[in-house]
Amino acid sequence: MKRHFTYIAFGLCLLTSLFSCDKDPGIDDNFLNYKIEKIPATKDYTLGAFYINYGNFNPAILEVPSVGKYNFTNGVPAPAVMASHIQQAAKAKINYFIFSLRSANGNLSSYTQDSLLVRSFLNAPGGGDMHFALSYNLNIGSSTAAGQLPITNTAPIENFPSYLEGFYKDFERMTNFFKLPNYQKVNDKPLIIITPAQNLSSKDNPALYAELRRRVKAKGFDLYIVGMQDRWSPPQRFYFRFEKCVDAMYESKMVDTGDSPDRVYLFPQLVDQNWQYWKSYLKGVNIDFIPSISPGFNYTILNPSSKNLPLGRNAGGASEDEKANFYRDFCNIAKKSAPDNGLIFIDSFNEWRVDSQIESAESYGDLYLDVTRQEFKLNP
């Protein structure tokens, strides 16, 4: 109820400000009428880039990676491709890749495939020098086998004891990765992401997370847990699934604007306002807010009939440097909203299907790798 009063009070204040003017408001009076401030890096931000297994390179994708079009055979790219990706990440000064990990309890074959991708990274030249983290995927980490239901079902997970136990076991199993010297840590705690954490239905989420932490602690590790919530949503919407549960939160791809033209044409300002609010609110409940940025997004690559407007990529101008203006603005918004620990997510390194990748391409070269390094590191 308290949250509803907050929204009502905000709306009344906004109406009061609109109708108390001596003149009709114009564009100069709009609170979204501003340019994104350029914020020089005052420290080296800690950058994690989502690494995507997309299967086969779809022929509808016109961009060509600098390494050539590549597939994930049995979930793994060719060794030379992975080695090149690690080299590109080093050029961008990305600290770690984030790999999706599905449930061994719910889908053993998918878990095996995901594990092989992580192993291919670890075994590639340079893989031991770069860090990595895991993202536990709730949407595709579940099973409809007898006695189990998808974890996204609205029924609380406690109603299905076998699945609940499997859920805990999945995290206990992850400690084998946590033991590796190049697993990404925050304050000496292994970083683990849960996506989308809003779908983790429980009778008592704080108790669920407390038990999860207890079990992993018994294996020798305290966790830094990051929960992902759906894009373009207020932080209070699923407060009962995050507060007193996770250490940090982030919103999924903000560049996925749906069919809302306003979000496209006012994207930098709307995200800036959204993230400032998120950071302020979460600070009050002792949760870090982590910005997640992308250089672009385009649904129409694989779905030409989509009504969703493309966003970003090459929207800034004609020259090579101007092409990255959208991404530079996004980087500055992220710096403005970043937590004290400097964590920032990049979504993604190589998601070519929706044009959100920063991976090097034949058309734009290393442009987005260079911008990433220049915007987030002290000595680019």
Image (spheres, rainbow, N blue to C red):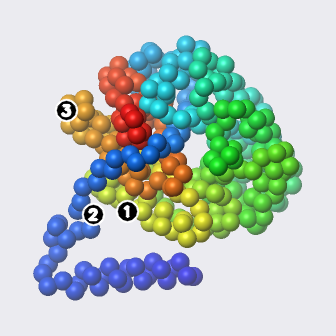
Q: How far across and how far down the image is residue 169, in percent?
A: 83, 44
| Viewer-side residue, 280 vs 357 | 280
Q: Residue flagged by tag 3: what amino acid is it?
A: Ala
3 and 1 marks in contact (CB < 8 Å): no
Q: How far across and how far down the image is residue 114, in percent?
A: 68, 30
**Is residue 183 among the parts visible in the rendering?**
yes
2 and 1 marks in contact (CB < 8 Å): yes
Circle 2 residue: 32
Circle 1 residue: 273
The residue at 48%/62% (across/down) is: 279
Image mark count? 3
The answer to which quarter of the image holds residue 95 is: top right
Q: Secondary structure at mark 1?
A: helix
Circle 3 residue: 318
Q: Residue flagged by tag 1: what amino acid is it?
A: Gln
3 or 1: tag closer to the N-terminus: 1
Relative to 259, is 120 above or below? above
What's the distance in space between the residues labelled 2 and 1, CA to CA? 9 Å
Sort mark 2 into few (<14), some (14-19) or many (20+) by Cα contacts within 10 Å.
Answer: some
**Is residue 260 among the parts visible in the rendering?**
no
2 or 3: tag closer to the N-terminus: 2
What's the distance in space between the residues labelled 3 and 1, CA to CA? 28 Å
